[in-house]
Image: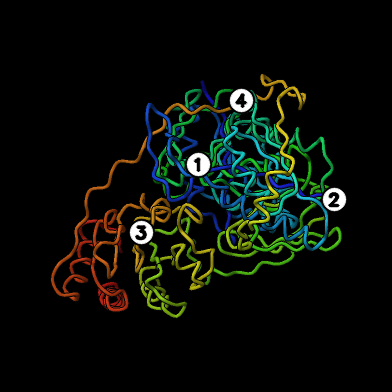
Amino acid sequence: MAKNVLVLADVRRGKLRNVTYEMVSAAHRIADGGAVSVALLGKDVAALAAGLGDFGADRVYVVDAPELEHYTPDAYKKAFMECVRAANPDILLLAHSAVGKDLAAVMATRLGAGQVSDVIDIEGSGDHLTFTRPIYAGKAFTKVQVTEGVVVATVRPNNLPPAEGGLGKAGQVETLAVTFGPQDLATVVKEIVQKTSSGVDLSEAKIIVSGGRGVKSAEGFKPLYELAEVLGAAVGASRGACDAGYCDYALQIGQTGKVVTPDLYIACGISGAIQHLAGMSNSKVIVAINKDPEAPIFQVADYGIVGDLFEVVPMMTELLKKELA
Amino acid sequence: MNILVCLKQTFDTEERIVVENGRVKEDGVKFIINPYDEYAVEEALRLKEEHGGEVTVVSVGPSRFEEAIRTALAMGADEAILADDPALFGDEYTVAKVLAAIIRQRPFDIILAGNQAVDDGSGQVAVRLAEELGIPHISTLTKLVVEGNQVTGYRDAEGDVEVVQATLPVLVTAQQGLNEPRYPSLIGIRKASKKPLTHVTAADLGLNPEEIRPRTKVVDTFLPKPKQAGKILQGDLQEQVRELVQSLRTVDKVIG
């Protein structure tokens, strides 16, 4: 049976993240003839609505308000509920991102709904949807169905099939006016400190250069950042490197920390503890650089170089600089 | 200050996962406090040390959870409530309803929880709980400051830090980096066995299990396909690097 699907556009620093298009494409596949709508929430975001029709959106509901400049659960809930009222969805898709995973749980509770988090695959359409998601940070997977009521799912970036444009749907923009009261502003963002200097976000990065204890110091991350810059990559780290104080915990990849699935993961001086492997072993191509030929990281690596990362990484950077110039 | 901490017991993160008959096998597994919940326990104890009050641990799960709860009591929590009635088990929808029912029976100023569990990793329960209770929440904190009624949370938002304010009562979730959890002391361990741990059932909470039945069901559990053994490159380093870059560009096509 046809199902109405509502997608929350994932906005970061004034742009739509790619996962938005992946979700709209998925919505188009699973709606089974139902309406595909997008909720676009934020401040000065209305212009981002253009082009969503091409990926399968019938309608785009825009709530553009100063109160939505930064994410807060209550203001976003209020705005998103207005979109839900307008779109009457059977299925809600949000990104498994800082905003999406928080708002999804709020909305699921408000709607008395079941939620499937961190989805990497959606099979079926209409009434028969099966979601695949990792458990134990990717050491295993489950297939999950929602048994009754509205379906809420959060989608991991980079995992659903790539978005396909050219659908020529209307993508008709409808602006919703929302008034925010004191109860909608129970939490207030006072300040934002941007720590990710490269601007490449770990969870959506196509390439990640990651360092472990073998990096030896905070200074030791420098060659990794240089390689990352040439590749347009994000920099990550193992728990060992974070615990040793070489880098911020925000970079940590593993069962505690972030779970990532880039196209290319370059592990430098990482031995490959089970809890780290859980966070990255589902990457498409893995390169391991380590002095110890016995390091477990080599067992999940597609390519291994047994050697000193302080020799190998700069060589790669130099070569790539020439080749990609 | 009445401080509540939600806690779950999980597999140790160094455990391998074995799936048998479509389920994750638990035999012989080492269990720990979910690491994110452990940060929440530590932060609760620090709040108590600063502001006075009581720390109560609240949990929903089988009786094996007692071990993790006793650890939290040994760290310094004052008492605990465990809903270990199987009629109360279910998905995130169900667990949030059960936690809310327990918490509605008690006074509280702040609720702390991990931002997710290292097993299911869905990150839903704490946020759902705040919404069930109708109180504000701030997620994934790497720093928490409580002054009077004013709560300031430093929220990890994909690497950026958002400084968020709210007033009590509030629910906050812990991100890695919030603190360094203490080890239980010997005296703490001795005291823990005498601290009150109350078991509650559906009847105690006035809950009808049918009304809080899960909204989701797991239809399959499986392991990822084993990875093909990779290729250890040979030759001098310069040559290896050249071969690697060549393969990544032309065979795997993962670089420009």
**Residue B144 position in % (x across, y down):** 71, 61
Answer whether labels 2 and 4 touch (C-beta < 8 Å).
no
Q: Mark 3 and mark 1, same subunit?
A: yes
**Circle 1 — which element?**
helix
Residue A113 image-quadrant placement: top right
Q: Secondary structure at mark 4?
A: helix
Earlier residue among tags 2 and 3:
2
The front one of B226 and A171 is B226
Residue position marked by numbered label 1 in the rendering: A24
Local secondary structure at mark 3: loop
Q: Residues within 10 Å of mark 3 (few under 14, many from 20)?
A: many
Closer to the camera in the image, A85 or B246: B246
| Residue type marked 3 | Gly
Q: Few, some or many C-alpha atoms within 10 Å of disc 4 (few <14, some 14-19, many ≥20)?
A: some
Q: Look at discs 1 and 2 and give the one toward the viewer.
A: 2
Residue at (60, 26) in percent of width and height? B214
